[in-house]
Amino acid sequence: MNGHHTITAPALEPTPHRDVLEARVARRIAARLTEGSDNLPHDIGERLRVARQQAVDRARQLRKLSTVASWQAQGSTAVMWGPPSWWLRAASVVPIALLLLGLFAIQRTYLEQQISAAAEIDEAILTDDLPPQAYTDPGFAEFLKSPRAAE
């Protein structure tokens, strides 16, 4: 181990209360480090000063990256809520058009099946040995229901 330690904090969303608390803790740590640095040899004090400067620079970079990422996220959200492009409109219309075409095809197929079934019944009635008036006779309906008619 070379004596260098890296402390990483869990990523938390920035809030005004959290920012104030972090600033307060940072000031206390800086004050304690400054107090203790008066009693250190010059070379160690210089190394600590350079390390602090690097830490401050790194924090600025991270803050800047965080701000840029936040702006980009807000920008992409703003674009999503802007006026819809023609691609978005087309993407919205195509599923509706396909749904309507599907419903039209289903209705047409159903209607053709009904016409076909009615045509088969009409064909059976017209080609049967009985005259069409027999089907309207109440006695004939009773005859069809009787067990002898099934033989």
Image (tube, grey):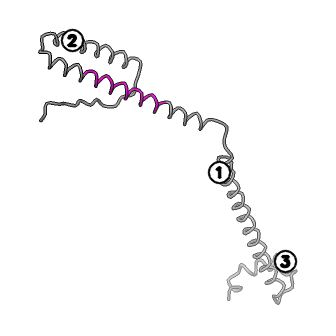
Residue 148 rendering spot, x and y as whole percentages? 69, 86
Q: Residue at the spot x=28%, y=25% of the render?
A: 54
Q: Residue at the spot x=39%, y=28% of the render?
A: 13
- Residue placed under numbered mark 3 in the picture: 137
Q: CA distance from mark 1 to mark 3?
A: 60 Å
Residue 69 in the magenta stretch? The answer is: yes
71 to the left or right of 106: left
For disc 3, the neighbor class at 10 Å (few under 14, some 14 to 19, many from 20) is few
Q: Which residues are magenta?
A: 52-70
Main SS, magenta region, reads helix
| Nearer to us: label 1 or label 3 | 1
Residue 95 rendering spot, x and y as whole percentages? 65, 54
Residue 138 rendering spot, x and y as whole percentages? 82, 75
Q: Residue at the spot x=54%, y=37% of the render?
A: 76
Q: Give residue 34's mark.
A: 2
SS category of the residue bearing label 1: helix
- Residue placed under numbered mark 1 in the picture: 91
Q: Relative to the observer, which residue lies in front, 115 or 104? A: 104
Q: Are marks 1 and 3 in contact (CB under 8 Å)?
A: no
User: Which quadrant holds the N terminus?
Assistant: top left
Q: Amino acid at mark 2?
A: Thr
